[in-house]
Amino acid sequence: MNLSKPISTQPYRGRLAPSPTGLLHLGHARTFWTAQQRAIANAGTLILRNEDLDPARSRPEFVSAMLEDLRWFGFQWHEGPDRGGPFAPYSQSERRPRYLAAFEQLRTAGLVYPCTCTRKDLAGALSAPHEGDDEPLYPGTCRSNSALHPPPSPFSWRFRVPDGETISFDDGNLGPQQFIASRDFGDFIVWQRDDLPAYQLAVTVDDNAMRITEVVRGADLLKSTARQLLLYRALALEPPAFYHCPLMTDETGRRLAKRHDALSLRALRAQGAAPESLRHNWT
């Protein structure tokens, strides 16, 4: 089933959605720059969302650095945690009631089940993550668990994917995409054992609530798009359009990550680099 949609006829709304778990690097900047240019080209609105759901890794100093580095690089947003806007709050840590409501909707519909598996439990049962994806294929160990009678031990909640269904969408940059549920990706976590919403649920809820018409992000999230399209359908929400950008890599061919401190915007700025020169060859 093709669950994609063209860019909405509604006024264009794009977003920048960094996580304050480290310093932003040049790869973030290139993807964000594409998002900003597409918002400008469509005479649209650009939203900054602070994805600070992880309390163990999100730090106030990274939030401050994020805002400062984005401004230095030339980003300008219309709504955000520092500017406010009609869909505030713009920090995910302040949006818990919205995530709870969506989760309860999924649970009431019988679309999720409690999972007691820990990372250690799954280490021997799971194959390595598929290339380009950071989530291994879940083997379905806890599928028989009842949502009405959760186990007494700590557990997370997984979304039950429709086995064998082809999830397809038309990407604005990479063209037609398709993934088969239970083969390319498995049941995924929507609510974590530490009582926090998982990325897939939070992003789906927020992009809809903030009326995002196009999501611009890295190509490493293509399978996440397939997962989120299932959530959009389950929650009876209209999905946005999607545009996935190639990833920036280092000299060894590995994609840039926050461990690449030498290519952080903060380090490049300290070295005297000019934003204009850094993005000179970007298209």
Image: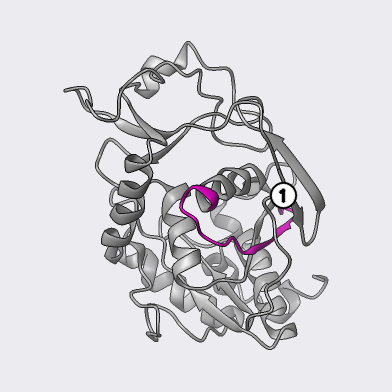
- Which is more toward the observer, 98 or 125? 98
- Which is more toward the observer, 249 or 126? 126
- Which is more toward the observer, 172 or 276? 172
- Residue 275 in percent (x, y) is at 67, 78
Task: Specify whether residue 158 is in view.
Answer: yes
The crowding category of the residue bearing disc 1, from other C-alpha atoms within 10 Å (few below 14, some 14 to 19, many at least 20), is few
Say what secondary structure mark 1 lies in. Answer: loop
Dividing the picture into quadrants, the one containing residue 244 is: bottom right
Residue at (24% x, 43% y) in the render: 195
Residue 16, above or below 87 = above
- Residue 92 in percent (x, y) is at 35, 63
Residue 236 located left or right of residue 37:
left
- Residue 225 in percent (x, y) is at 61, 49
Q: Quadrant of the C terminus?
A: bottom right
Colour scheme: one colour
Total of numbered circles in the picture? Answer: 1
Task: Specify whether residue 274 is in view.
Answer: no
Dividing the picture into quadrants, the one containing residue 122 is: top left
Residue at (24% x, 29% y) in the render: 148
Q: Quadrant of the N terminus?
A: top right
Residue 146, above or below 213 = above
Residue at (67% x, 38% y) in the render: 132
Q: Is residue 224 magenta?
A: no
Residue 18, above or below 1 = below
Residue 180 located left or right of residue 281:
left
Query: What's drawn in magenta, residue-wise?
Result: 233-249
Amino acid type at mark 1: Thr
Q: Residue furthest left?
A: 152
Query: On the image, numbered disc 1 is attached to which residue?
Result: 249
- Residue 69 in percent (x, y) is at 51, 74
Residue at (51% x, 77% y) in the render: 47
